[in-house]
Amino acid sequence: MNLVHVITEVRGDYTFVVYNYYSGDVKEVRVDADKYALYDDRNSLAGLPDACPFLRFDTEGKAWCTVHFTRPDICRDYCCWRLLIRDAQGKRAGRVLYQRTFLSDNDELGRLWDEMKPQLSGLNDEEWDMAVIRFLTAAGYHVRE
């Protein structure tokens, strides 16, 4: 997402101005008070130069938006997804965030994920994406990259 949002101003006290390359929107964001330490630890982004400047991973590998409460509107709409999963009616059913973090918005998709997960072991990123898209499409979901 660093290809989408870039920090254009550091205002201090964990407050920043970000610019959206796609929409031209400018937004002031502030790191959530409970995520200061997580934000300060940039080690979790090693090897991810294009990641959102506010994305961090905790010690268990869970992805966090450190500016969740003041995040830009596009993030509110899509929550920084890499794959957006919609049900047959077009309602958001889940997302895959940076790398392979899968978030389900309903129990049915969660069950499908549990069924699908063993089949994804050992796949490279491209194969993994294609397998997820193929499986979910066959189950009646629409997946947007």
Image (spheres, rainbow, N blue to C red):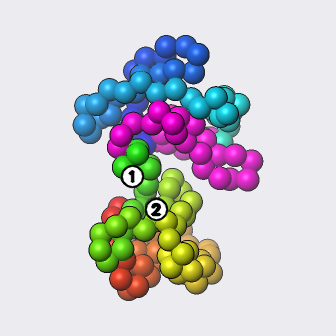
Residue at horizontal 43 percent and vertical 54 percent from the top: 81
Q: Which mark is residue 10?
A: none
Asked whether 32 falls inside the magenta stretch, the response is: no
Q: Look at the image and tell me in which quarter the C terminus lies.
A: bottom left
Mark carried by residue 78: 1
Indicate the secondary structure of the residue bearing disc 2. strand
Which residues, given as a range, are shown in magenta?
45-74
Q: Residues within 10 Å of mark 2 (few under 14, many from 20)?
A: many
Q: Which residue is mark 2?
A: 95
Going by the image, does 35 lie left or right of 120?
right
Picture quarter containing residue 114?
Answer: bottom right
Residue at 43% across / 56% down in the picture? 82
Mark earlier in primary sequence (2, 1): 1
- Relative to 3, residue 12 above or below: above
Tell me, yes or no, whether the two marked residues, 2 and 1, touch with CB atoms within 8 Å.
yes
Query: Residue 12: horizontal and vertical position, in percent?
Result: 55, 13
Report the Cα–Cα distance between label 2 and label 1. 8 Å
Residue 54 is one of the magenta-drawn residues: yes
On the image, the x and y values in percent for residue 45 come to: 60, 41
Residue at 43%, 68% in the rendered image: 93
Side of 59 where 51 appears, left or right: left
Give percent across and percent down for residue 76.
40, 45
Amino acid type, label 1: Tyr
